[in-house]
Amino acid sequence: MKRLVLLAAGFVVVALVGAVPASADNGPHKIGAGPVADSCGACHRIHTAKAPRLLKEDQVALCFSCHGAGAPGADNDVQSGVGITGGTAGALRGGGFEYALLEADNPSGLSSAGVVPASSTGEQVTSTHSVNSTEQTAWGFGAVDGSTNYGKKVTLSCGNCHDPHGNGNYRILRTTPRGMYSKGEVAPEVAIADATTKVYTTTNYWLTSDSNGLEFAEKIAAWCSICHARYPVDHGGSIPSGDPVYSYRHTSNKAEQGAGKRTCVQCHVSHGSNAAMGPTSESVPFPDGSAAGADSRLLRADNRGVCQICHAK
């Protein structure tokens, strides 16, 4: 598997020394910038825009111009899975869209004492939340009912989940992701209070809560369920839901703080994972029965090892 040496991200660190960090709800993404803000021209062109929403270039390319490999001006390189905390490069908590730094083949410990180490080198991802505007399926979208419904077709880019203008929420997450609900539909909203201090990196991918953002662990399952509404459940997988596709479901919306509390992010990263799937794990299809192959479903450990960390069978 192709690797990206973390030291190759040194340019990011060097560039940041003389740059103003663009932290969430800060810098160009700050809410309430005022009527004569100087930041609009960084992203928009009024008469010569090259992309929808009057953007000066394609949205992903525009976001990666600050949050991409070797780009200056941001504390998180979501393309390479590298973050900056206190001026030091490390493994980005959410993984990356092209590379990630999970030592996914080396988990240890049990339940809340589990460890999935962060690696010093990045590996190509085996699954991502798509941001390239191609059509994807939001598996489990919609209400639990008796119909055979797998989800909703959507096109995703960075701005579907994050508000580039700032909104005071954790990681500038929108209260409702764009593109999921049509005009006139009642859309659920989940606001997660921002972190007091931004910590983008981790040394253990099994520790998912954020001591600086106390609402994150409490509310993230509700936020994820805006798109994946038929996944969350607060009990074990012994009670049928009545849905022919998403019938029995693992606990995924326990709201307590800490690792091992079984929210969505206990098992999955948000951007991309480099976890590998072996022959048996590769045989697990997508909900519609189509072959998933090596897709790692954003999991934090190889071969669905997240199960063994808690259950150790």
Image (cartoon, rainbow, N blue to C red):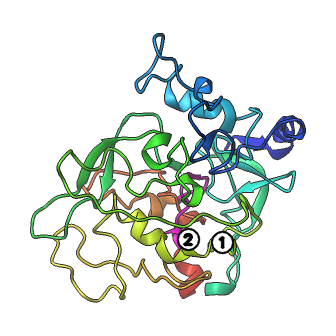
Q: Which residues are magenta?
A: 263-277
Q: Is label 1 in contact with label 2 (beta carbons under 8 Å)?
A: yes
The furthest residue to the front? 35
Check the image and name the residue furthest to the left. 146
Q: Which corner quadrant of the image does residue 142 belong to?
A: bottom left
The reply to whether the magenta stretch includes residue 274 is yes
Residue 126 shown left or right of residue 236 in the figure: right
In-front residue for pair 16/102: 16
From the image, give the main secondary structure of the stretch colored magenta.
Answer: loop
Residue 146 relative to residue 93: left or right = left
Mark 1 or mark 2: whose residue is earlier in sequence: 1
| Rendered view: 6 above or below 115 | above
Circle 1: element type: loop
Which labelled disc corresponds to residue 216?
A: 2
Question: Is disc 2 surrounded by few (<14), some (14 to 19) or many (20+) residues within 10 Å?
Answer: many
Residue at the spot of label 1: 210
**Residue sitting at x 73%, y 61%:** 199
Three-letter residue code for mark 1: Asp
- Residue 110 shows in this picture: no
The amino acid sitting under disc 2 is Phe
Quadrant of the rendering where the N terminus is positioned: top right
Q: State the separation of the CA atoms marked 1 and 2.
A: 7 Å
Q: Residue at x 77, y 58 (%)?
A: 119
Q: Nearer the viewer, residue 50 or 152?
A: 50
